[in-house]
Image: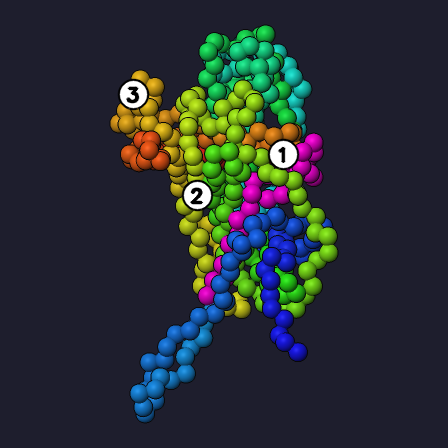
Amino acid sequence: MTDPVIRPSNGVLLIALQSAEGVPAAPSAATDAIPFEVDSPDYNSPYKTEDSNEVTGSFDAGAPLVVGQPATIAFRSRLKGAGAGVTYTSLVKPPLHAALSICGWLGQFTAGVSAAALTAGTASSGTLGTGFAATAQAYRGMPLILTGAPAAGRLPLVSDYSAAKLAKLTDLYGSALSASNTAELPANWTYAPTSPRDSSERASMHPCATVWLYEDGVLHQWIDCRGMVDLDGNSARPGYGAFSLTGIYVGKSDAAVPSNPVFARQSAPLLLQGGGAAPAIQIAGKPLPISKWSLKSNVTIESPDDPNTQQGFAGAQLADRSLMLEIDPLSTLVATRNVLADIAAFTQYAGGLMMPAPAGNRVSIALPLLQPVQATPAMRGKLRSETQLYRALNPGRDAAGRDGPAVLCFS
């Protein structure tokens, strides 16, 4: 009989959060399936070899030493919601909930707030009305659905929120908002990076997970996995999360691919203004004509030496991060946009990306505090462009105890 070949496109990826390190979870295809790009899964061998330096009585090398090494798993997923028309609840979560959680992006559910008139406003802010909480940073990174001129049809992201209900917005309007405008908050899940202050917070903010990858009749298993995620995309295309995980390899076995795994099967939303009024990407309240974008986490992942494990390494730990946004807008007149002057002046401002779609499949990324650090001349076809780099800074903890260099929202 010919040996069966492995066809990776016939695969399922499951990620289940663990209750603690060293305590494997039991992922289920009904609840823990992760949609991923078919050509993206990549993993290493749990072993490596070191050549012997012993004399053997000849020029031939002695028996090599086989040692363990940290196990790595990588995959790429489209950013999409639970499904068009789906209403988020504390139990109805986005498809990438577990994957984002083990990268230190803590998820927080926020119930919707019905439309209510603003009590005051400016061209870039509004004081929210009845039903909204008087809790600082309760809504940071979330979209508001506005009605009335000059904001009708816009979905600005909240870049800052005070206990006085003042919401600073990523949008900049031609005139001030007022009591004639209403604001509504859709039910949503937000994810933001975290910095645990003690062991208790580490358990909730930096959980680890069990990962199972089925490939055409073979099951690979890892435990105590943590990692990092880089976000990227192109104009008029979906956003992606590129996940790089590190953990402890458990082993592989022959196992049938699960039947009927449950995961979001709808198309992902696009970075595209389309027929709406809200710009797809803007920084400092100005829309930018880009062709691509990326938000890199630059996380350091450490796998401590530990002889009390199968390969000699303990579960992965997140050590630090440095979020950087890179975009490539077309160049324009100085009077329109002057990033070089902003760099020289150490200017800081908010930004955001919106991938509009029906409720339940909408995705946005708020960047509450950006500082430009580089603008390099480039070309896009026959047109002059700039490769711009921005450091995403932490404006302080939000109401859920998370940092705020970036907030990924599914609404």
Viewer-side residue, 104 vs 257: 257
Kindly check if marks 3 and 1 are in contact, taking CB atoms under 8 A apart as contact: no
Q: In the rendered view of the protein, which quadrant contains the C terminus?
A: top right
Q: Distance between the residues labelled 3 and 2?
A: 31 Å
Mark 1, secondary structure of its residue: loop
Which stretch did the figure color magenta? 69-96
Which residue has dot 3 on it? 334
Residue type at numbered disc 3: Val
Q: In this view, does 175 lie to the left or right of 259?
A: left
Q: Where is residue 15 in the image (x, y as percent from the top left)?
A: 61, 52
Quadrant of the drawing holding the N terminus:
bottom right
The secondary element bearing badge 2 is classed as loop
The residue to which callout 2 is attached is 297
Residue 57 lies in the magenta-colored region:
no
Label pair 3/2, CB-CB below 8 angstroms: no
Mark 2 belongs to which amino acid?
A: Ser
Mark 3 lies on a secondary structure that is loop
Instruction: Kindly identify the residue that appears in the image at 52 percent across and 17 percent down.
Output: 166
